[in-house]
Amino acid sequence: MMKQYFEIKEQYKDTILFFRLGDFYEMFYDDAILASRELELTLTGRDCGQEERAPMCGVPFHACEAYIARLIAKGYKVAICEQMEDPALAKGLVKRDIIRVVTPGTVIESSMLDDAKNNYIGSIFLRGGEAGVCFADVSTGTCHTTQLSGKGGLDDAVIAELCRFAPSELLFNSEILRHKAVTAYVKDHLACSVELLDEADYQPAASEERMRTQFGAQYEQKIGVRKNSVAFYCMAALLAYLGETQKRGIERLKTAELYSGSQYMQLSPVTRANLELTETMRGREKKGTLLWVLDCTETAMGKRLVRSWIEQPLLDAGAINERLDGTAELCAQNVLRADLRATLSRIFDLERLMTRVLYGSATPRELLALAATCEQLPVLLTQLEPCGSAALANVRAAIDPLQDLRELVQRAVDEQAPSTLKDGGVIRAGYNAEVDELRDIMHGGKGYLTDLEAKLREETGISKLKIGYNRVFGYYIEISHAVTAPIPENFIRKQTLAGAERYITDELKQLESKILGASERLIVLERELFDGLLADVAAQLERVQRTAAALAKLDVLAGFAEAAVRYNYVRPTVDDGDELVIEEGRHPVVERVMSGGLFVPNDTRLDCDENRMLIITGPNMAGKSTYMRQNALICLMAQIGSFVPAKAARVGIVDSIFTRVGASDDLAAGKSTFMVEMTEVAEILKTATPKSLVILDEIGRGTSTFDGMSIARAVVEHIAAKGGGLACKTLFATHYHELTDLENAIDGVKNYNIAVKKRGDDITFLRRIVRGPADDSYGIEVAKLAGLPDEIIARAKEVLKVLESSTVTPNPVMQLDFSNYERFEQEETPPAIAERLRALDVETLTPLEALNTLYELKQQLK
C-alpha cells in the first residue's frame, strides 16, 4: 500500500495528498507533519516496512470538506486519492487514483464558497506588448477573456483587470517575471495562489486541440478568440490546468465572453478602493459600501451579478437605458415587485447546483432543491406576462420552465431523502422495481418467510414444520422427530438435534441471500440509479444555465427597484453628452449610516465647456470629500442601470473615474505619503481622457507650501486647459486659497465652497456647496472640534497672528530662484554694502571676524 502511496505522491509533489483508507483520508510523512500543524490534528505513526514509523494523521472522509477548506484558505492544494473499487470485492490491493485536485480557484463545494461572490481562477499570457487575460469561475461556469495592448501601460491594464476580478488563483507564463509592477501588485494586494506554467504548456498544437475539444471546431466564431492570439494561449493553458486538476467537470465551461475595455468604465484599483464599491478601506467589509446599499437581491445568483455590475459599469447608453427601463417598470408596480421578490426568495443557486451535478458530487437534497426551483419558474413566467420593458421581456423569453427536469427529479428522488447516499432511502418508491423489491424484502422479510413456511406445510403435509434462523447455519427448516410423514427429496439435512432435524432447500437459501444481501445491494443500486439521474440532469446544462442567467438579471433589476423605492432614488437621464447635472444629490452610503439628522443634499453642474473644473474650498470635516465622492458614485450608479440618490440627474457617459483622495503611504515599497500622492496624480494625467471624471482632493499637501502650491496649480492648469490639456470634468478640493484666482485666469474653472457659520470661536458646518471661494480655512477651529487642549488652541492663534502680520502671502510664482541672484544683488543691496561684500575674502575670515562683519553690515542697513 505504501508503494502505491509513493507512486501517487510522486505525481503530486506540490499538494497535500488525502489518501483514502477505509473511512479516513490519511496523510503521511511531510504531508502529515504539515497537516497536523495547520489543522491541529494528532500526529501518530504507522509501520510501513521501514526502519522508522511513518508520521501519519487523518480526517474522516465524510467530514473532509471542513478540513480541506481550512487548507485551501491557507493557500495549499489538496489532492484527493480515492478507492476506485469496493474493498470487499477487490482482489489484492484496492485500486486508488486521484479523482480531483482542490485548489483555491477550483473549489465547487458550497461549504467553502461565499454565495455572494464569484471564485475566479485567472490565466494571464504575456507576449511582446500584449497580454491575454482569462478569468473563469468553475463553480458557476462563467468565463471572461480579453486582450490588452501596451497602449497606456500594459502593466496598469493587467493590474486593472486583476483588481476587477480579484482571482483566488492565477496562472502565468514566465514572461510575467519581466513585469515587476504586476508581480508586486499580486504579492501585496491579492490573497491568491500563483502558478508559473512552463513554456511547454503553451505549445500551439496542444493548445489548438484543447480549444477544439472544449468549444468545438468553430471555436473562433463561437467565442471570438482568434487562433494563436494571446487570448487563445491564456485560455488554452487554463483549460489544460483544469483538465489536469479536476479530471472531470471541465465541460462546465460551455462558452466564454470575449469583452473589451470599450464596453466598461475604467476604474483603477485606487479608485475602487477610494469609492469603497464592494469593501471598505479599513475593515474590508461589505457594510458601508455601495454594494451594501444596492444589494437588495433575493438569490445567490443575483448577489454575484449585482457585484459584477457594480465592478463593471457600462459605456453603452442603449444598454444602460434598457436596464433603467426594467428598473423603472418594477418601481412603478409595487405589488408585482413584491410578488417577484417573494418568488425569487424560493429560488436556489442553480449555477452552483449544476456544477456539482456535473462533477457527480451533488447530494439528493441538492437535486430536490433544483426541482423546487423548477417549480417556481412557471410562477415567475406568469408574473412577468404583463411586463412591457425590453429588459423584462428578454428575461421572460430566456426562462425555461424546465418542467421535464422537475418531473424527472421528483419521480426519482424521495422527498424525504437524506443528505447523503450512504444509508440509502434516496430513490422514490415506484421509480425502480428492483429497489421496491429489495425494500420489501428488507422491511417485510418475515412475511416472505411466513408465506414460504405455509407453502411448505401444505406441500409436505407436515403441520408442525417451521422455519428458524441462527448465525451459524442461517435460515433452516426444522421438523420434529415425532413426525412420521416422509421428508421431501429436495430437503437437505444440515443438523441433527435431540428432538428434531434441520434442513435447507434451494428456495430457502435464495430467500436467505435476498434478505441478508438486500440492504447492501439496495445501497449499491441506489447509487447507480442516482448517478444515472445526475447524468440525465447534467445533459440539460445549457438550458439551466440560460435560465439561471435570466433569473440573476431579474433579481438584480428587482433589487434596484426595491432600493430606489426604499431610499427615494430617481431615474437618471443617461446619454452620450458631456453634462453631469445633479439636483439635490446625496451620498448613497453616508445617508444610510448617519445615526442622526438628515443628509444635506447638494447640486452639481459639470461639463467639458464652461464648467469643466470646480475648485472647492472650505475647512476640513465640512464635507468636501463626501460631496466629490457622491458625484462619482451617482455617475457609476447611473451607468450600471440603477436609480440614483437625487431629486433629478442627467449623466453624460463617463468612460472612467479617477480619484486622488486622502493621505497614505507605501513604506514597504519605499514610497512616502507625498510620493504615493504624486504617483497617483501622474497616473491620472497619463490615463484620463476628455470623457473622464476626475476627483482630486488636496493635491500637494505632502510637501512644503510653495512646492505643493506650485504643483497643485500646474496640475489644475493642465487638466482644465483646452487644447493641450485634458479638459475633462474635474472636482478639485484644496486648502490653497491662492488657487481660487484661477477662475479669472482659465475659462471653465469655477469656485465653490462649503458654507460655514461662525459664532465667535465656534463654527457650524452647513454642509452646503455654494458659489465662490471660502473666506477662511478654519483649521484652528477644526482642531478645537477635534479635542486639542485649550492651551494649544490659544498658542496656535498667537502664532497665526504673528505669521499673518510678518509674512507675505505665499504665491507660487514667487518661489526663490537662484538664477535671479544678480538681479537681487543689484536691485535690493545698497551700493556700499555690495562693495564691501565683494572685497571680503571669506576663506580667510575667522568665525569671530565673520560675526563682527555681519553685525556691521546689519547696522548699515538700519
Image (tube, rainbow, N blue to C red):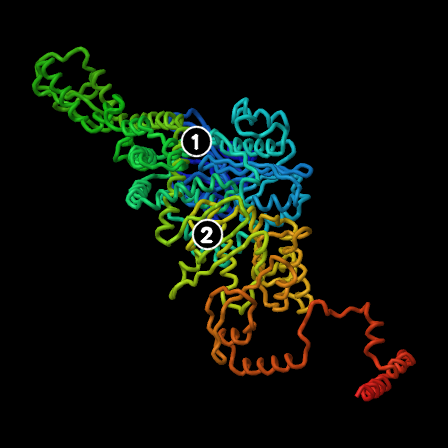
Q: Quadrant of residue 233?
A: top right
Q: Secondary structure at mark 2?
A: strand
Q: Pointers 2 and 1 in contact (CB under 8 A)?
A: no
Which of pointers 2 and 1 lies earlier in the amino acid sequence? 1
Q: Residue furthest top?
A: 489
Q: Is residue 610 visible?
A: yes
Q: Quadrant of the C terminus?
A: bottom right
With 481 as the anchor, is 844 left or right in this view?
A: right
Q: Tell me where residue 180 appears, x and y as whole percent.
A: 66, 47
Between 640 and 760, the one nearer to me in the picture = 760
**Residue 83: image tag:** 1
Residue linked to disc 2: 649
Residue shown at the point (84%, 82%) measured from the top left: 830
Q: Judge whether 846 appears above or below 47 on screen.
A: below
Q: Nearer the viewer, mark 2 or mark 1?
A: 2
Q: Judge whether 550 appears above or below 517 on screen.
A: below
Q: Amino acid at mark 2?
A: Ala
Residue shown at the point (61%, 27%) measured from the top left: 227
Q: Tell me where residue 826 appears, x and y as whole percent.
A: 85, 76
Between 184 and 420, the one nearer to me in the picture = 184
Q: Is residue 54 visible?
A: no
Q: Tell me where residue 820 appears, x and y as whole percent.
A: 81, 69
Q: CA distance from mark 2 to mark 1?
A: 64 Å
Count of marks, rendered view: 2
